[in-house]
Structure formats: structure tokens, C-alpha cells
Amino acid sequence: MEAYARVLRERRKAANLSQEELAFRTDLSMSYISFLETCRRQPTLTVMDAICRELGVSLTEFIGEVEGDVENNR
């Protein structure tokens, strides 16, 4: 989950989106986005897909980045 949180935060910032704006665009709460970025919640596949769409990345590519982060931080 830590790798997912890091990649999510990095992608969101790279897209110049605040947690509030990403939440609005995905119909989620800002606190839920914060919880995802701090490993206090685990997203469903549906939520991951919605977030990836707003970040302009495919779910496959996003998961690949998460896996790469896991490998680099072992």
C-alpha cells in the first residue's frame, strides 16, 4: 500500500491537482483521497480506475509504476 500511496501522490502532483480537485473530479471525498495517500484506506478497483482516468494514465500503467516502486524500495 505504501507504494500505491507514493505513486498516487506523485501522479496527482504531476497533474497539478490538489486532493480536493481530484476528489471532485472522481466524485470521492477529499478525506478519502488523503486516506489513500497516507495508507489509511485501500481503494477498490473501481476507485483506482476512476483515479487513473482523471490522472490521464491507464490502470495497467499505474499498477506497473506501483510494482516498480515496490521493487526499488525493497
Image (tube, rainbow, N blue to C red):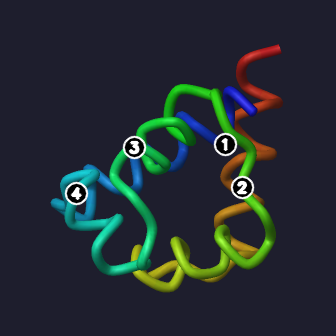
**Which residue corresponds to the image point at 42% horizontal and 78% vertical from the top-left?**
27
Q: CA distance from mark 3 to mark 1?
A: 17 Å
The image position of residue 71, as x and y in percent, is 82, 30
Q: CA distance from mark 4 to mark 2?
A: 17 Å
Q: On the image, numbered disc 2 is attached to which residue?
A: 43
The image position of residue 21, as x and y in percent, is 21, 66
Horizontal side of 8 relative to 70 (left or right) equals: left
Kindly report which numbered mark, 3 or 2, lies closer to the viewer in this rendering: 3
Which mark, by number, is residue 57?
none
Q: CA distance from mark 4 to mark 1?
A: 19 Å
Asked whether the beta carbons under mark 2 and mark 1 sit within 8 Å of each other, the answer is yes
**Classed neighbour count for the residue bearing mark 4: other residues with Cα under 10 Å, few (<14), some (14–19), many (≥20):** some
Q: What amino acid type is highlighted by mark number 3?
A: Ser
Outermost residue, top direction?
74
Q: What amino acid type is highlighted by mark number 1?
A: Tyr
Q: On the image, numbered disc 1 is attached to which residue?
A: 4
